[in-house]
Image (cartoon, rainbow, N blue to C red):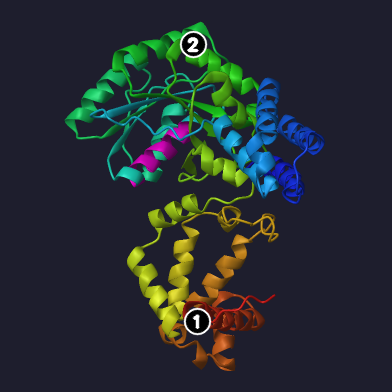
Amino acid sequence: MFESLGDRLQNALHKIKGYGKITEDNISDMMREIRLALLEADVNYQVVKEFTNTVKEKALGEEVQKSIKPGELFVKIVKDELTELLGGESSPLNISGNPAILMLVGLQGSGKTTTIGKLANFLRKKHSKKPLLVACDVYRPAAIDQLKQLGKQLGIEVYEEGKKDPVEISKNAIIYAKEHGYDYVLIDTAGRLHIDLELMEELQNINQEVKPQEVLLVIDSMMGQDAIHVIQGFNESLSLTGVILTKLDGDTRGGVALSVRHLTNVPIKFIGVSEKLDGLENFDPERMAGRILGMGDIISLVEKATEVIDEEEAMSAAKKMQSGKFDLEDFLKQMKQIKKLGPLENLIKMLPGAKKMGLTNVNIDPKQMAHVEAIILSMTPKERRNPDIIKASRKTRIAKGCGLSVQEVNKLLMQFEEMKKMMKQMTSGNFKMPF
């Protein structure tokens, strides 16, 4: 996400970090590069103009001129203004109702139905409460079936009454939710190919009847600047409380994310970061600005880890690493937990300085991880706990068992031994960087 824009901005800022003095000339050159980077990312022209003018004005201020490291202060100014452009601070969901009612709206093809499943899954994991999905898209063929299928995958109930009046369905769903102890009601409304009066009237009627705490517009970030007109159109009729941007993991320039809040005053609340049903993230302007500028996002990485990694298992593994007793059985457990965090490439990009270390273009083949898993699973429990006993005949049997070569078994065993040595050095404080 934002790879191209991030690369351009990081390259521009890298130059100015070395300047001993900030002058109007070198700032003008810098702002030209930043302006082009933002425009190429499809950020609205007016937004780009205001952003670059503000940054330039602050960069030429007295504080920067007197600073010992003006280049670093300039980078901070860019980050602060980028954060402001993205919304300043995160906008949490209003889930105060009993049940809390969330109404999702959007055009056809925006990913609304999939997103409602992701959001229900997110809320259930985050707050350990019960969501109910409501099928009010009664026009699109198979829309109800799609939502029911999502509900089945997630183990979340779907309330539906077939192709009846969506307003009545939503009212009945709330009564049902109260009677059966549901904490959240997520209403999947009908989309259209474009904004029309009939659609808006139906959405307004649902809104007036059920009075949702949140009216969230799901929008495809690949729409570019057209997304702004869609947001404004829906906002005029429904008073949106937030936006969910989908497909930010795709080949998108991301400019809409940098234009939404400034032009519509509607906050971005969530972003879709993968097609998986856990591929939804809270949108935090400061963290996103850090990611764009290559400063990493350790807080999000830690939050993601605490959601899926068992703390007791992690502590047990750490103690085994320190004592040198970490074996292939432990390694397999840790690998399975790491896989829950999502694609490793995305996690690496959250590390500060990942670009400098050449890690942003790393492609980790999931097949390689599957091969490692297959090799370990082909071992006996005794072999996993004591890799030293794995000699020639055992390696041949393991290779046959997993359908791979003896060389690949050897490679894994060698890498595991090297990793154990490094872990022991790191935990004992004797680790030295290899450069």
- Which residue corresponds to the image point at 58% horizontal and 41% vertical from the top-left? 289
| Residue 155 seen | no
| Camera-side residue of 338 and 21 | 21
Q: Between residue 232 and residue 388, name the one nearer to us.
A: 232
Q: Residue furthest left?
A: 179
Q: Which residue is mark 2?
A: 236
- Locate residue 343: give its quadrant: bottom right
Q: Quadrant of the N terminus?
A: top right
Task: Find residue 312 and report its horizontal and vertical position in percent.
Answer: 33, 68
Residue that appears at 40% across and 44% down: 153
Q: Which mark is residue 424?
A: 1
Residue 218 percent coordinates (x, y): 50, 27
Horizontal and vertical percent for residue 279?
49, 44
| Location of residue 102 in the rendering, given as x and y in whole percent from the top left corner | 36, 27
Residue 303 can be seen in this image: yes
347 sits left or right of 11 in the view: left
Q: Is residue 60 above or below residue 168?
A: below
Q: Assess whether residue 419 is covered by the magenta stretch.
A: no
**In the foreground, 388 or 148:** 388
In this image, 380 relative to 412: left or right? left
Residue sitting at x 43%, y 75%: 330
Highlighted range, magenta: 113-125
Q: Earlier in the sequence, mark 2 or mark 1?
A: 2
Amino acid tagged 1: Lys
